[in-house]
Each structure stands twice: as structure tokens, then as C-alpha cells.
């Protein structure tokens, strides 16, 4: 189960959104800043979105910050906003904590979408799914963050 969750986190980080050109509709004043994934170690599972439309994220899937098992990766890149969709373009990936788990980084899946379904001063929920075409989607879950 832990490996599946870690894979979903990686899939979230390495994916792209649609090519629609609807322009931003999200309140970027609320979106920009540092977010921590709910229920996970904050220092190893966070997302920072900058006004320059760059991002940095740390991902381990680890719940306990003192657990030596999870590997922690840092990903950097750019992002764009079209409607409620965020497109992440990864430019860099680094292993920053080499835990005792054996993990493998997968290549980004361009069919994965990130749709912001909730955005407040303290909460960010991103629906992660694969667009299979013909109005059919495969749900990968929600990434839930707080400040």
C-alpha cells in the first residue's frame, strides 16, 4: 500500500495537463506559497508554488519524519494554469534522502491531469486523474495540502 501511495505521489509530480488555452481562473494569490501534504511528514512531503510559475516539491510518502525507510526526492520545474488545471513541467529530480526502501523513479505520464477542486487560504485539494478520452477518466486520487 505504501508503494502504491508513493507511486501516486510520483505520478502527480511527473505529469502534464491539457493544452486548453483558457487562461488562469484560479486565485493565484491563494495558490502561491508553501503547502504541506496532509497526514505526511511535512519536511519530506511539501509543495512550493512561486509567483514566477516555478515549483519545488519534496516527496517521500513517509508519515513519520524519523522513519529511515522512505527515500525523499526533490523535484523542480515550471507550471502553468489553464482554468482549474495545473500543468507541471519537471526540469530536475534529485534524491535528497536515501532511505532503506528500494524505489524507482518513473517517467512522467503526459496523460495525467491535475485539477484544483478546492483552494482556500489554508487548503488546496488537487484531483489527479488520467484522461482516457471520450469523457472517460481513471481516478488516481486527491492530493490534499494545507499551510
Image (cartoon, grey):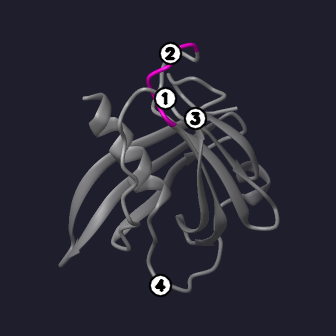
Q: Are marks 2 and 1 in contact (CB under 8 Å)?
A: yes
For the residue pair 76 and 134, the one nearer the viewer reads as: 76
For the residue pair 97 and 55, the one nearer the viewer reads as: 97
Please tell me whether mark 2 sits on a helix, a strand or a loop.
loop
Image: magenta residue range? 66-71
What residue is pinned by disc 1? 99
Q: Position of residue 124 (x, y in %)?
A: 58, 42
Label placed on residue 19: 4
**Cα distance in 3D space between marks 2 and 4:** 40 Å
Quadrant in the picture for residue 112 = bottom left
Q: Nearer the viewer, mark 1 or mark 3?
A: 1
Q: Position of residue 100 (x, y in %)?
A: 42, 26
What residue is pinned by disc 3? 45
Alpha-carbon neighbours of circle 1 within 10 Å: few (<14), some, or many (≥20)? some
Dominant SS in magenta: loop
Please give left or right for residue 55 compared with residue 16 in the image. Answer: right
**Which residue lies at the image location 27% right of the left edge and 38% below the top edge?**
4
Q: Nearer the viewer, mark 4 or mark 3?
A: 3
**Cα distance in 3D space between marks 2 and 3:** 13 Å
**Cα distance in 3D space between marks 4 and 1:** 37 Å
Amino acid at each position: 500500500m505504501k508503494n502504491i501511495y508513493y507511486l501516486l505521489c510520483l505520478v502527480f509530480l511527473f505529469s502534464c495537463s491539457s493544452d486548453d488555452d483558457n487562461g488562469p481562473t484560479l486565485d493565484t494569490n491563494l495558490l502561491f506559497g508553501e503547502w504541506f501534504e496532509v497526514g505526511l511528514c511535512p519536511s519530506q512531503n511539501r509543495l512550493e508554488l512561486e509567483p514566477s510559475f516555478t515549483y519545488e516539491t519534496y516527496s517521500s510518502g513517509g508519515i513519520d519524519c524519523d522513519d529511515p525507510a522512505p527515500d525523499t526526492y526533490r523535484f523542480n520545474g515550471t507550471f502553468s494554469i489553464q482554468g482549474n488545471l495545473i500543468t507541471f513541467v519537471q526540469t530536475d529530480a534529485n534524491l535528497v534522502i536515501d532511505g532503506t526502501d528500494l524505489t524507482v523513479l518513473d517517467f512522467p505520464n503526459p496523460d495525467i491531469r491535475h485539477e484544483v477542486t478546492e483552494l482556500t487560504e489554508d487548503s488546496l485539494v488537487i484531483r489527479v486523474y488520467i484522461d482516457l478520452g471520450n469523457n472517460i477518466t481513471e481516478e488516481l486520487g486527491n492530493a490534499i495540502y494545507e499551510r
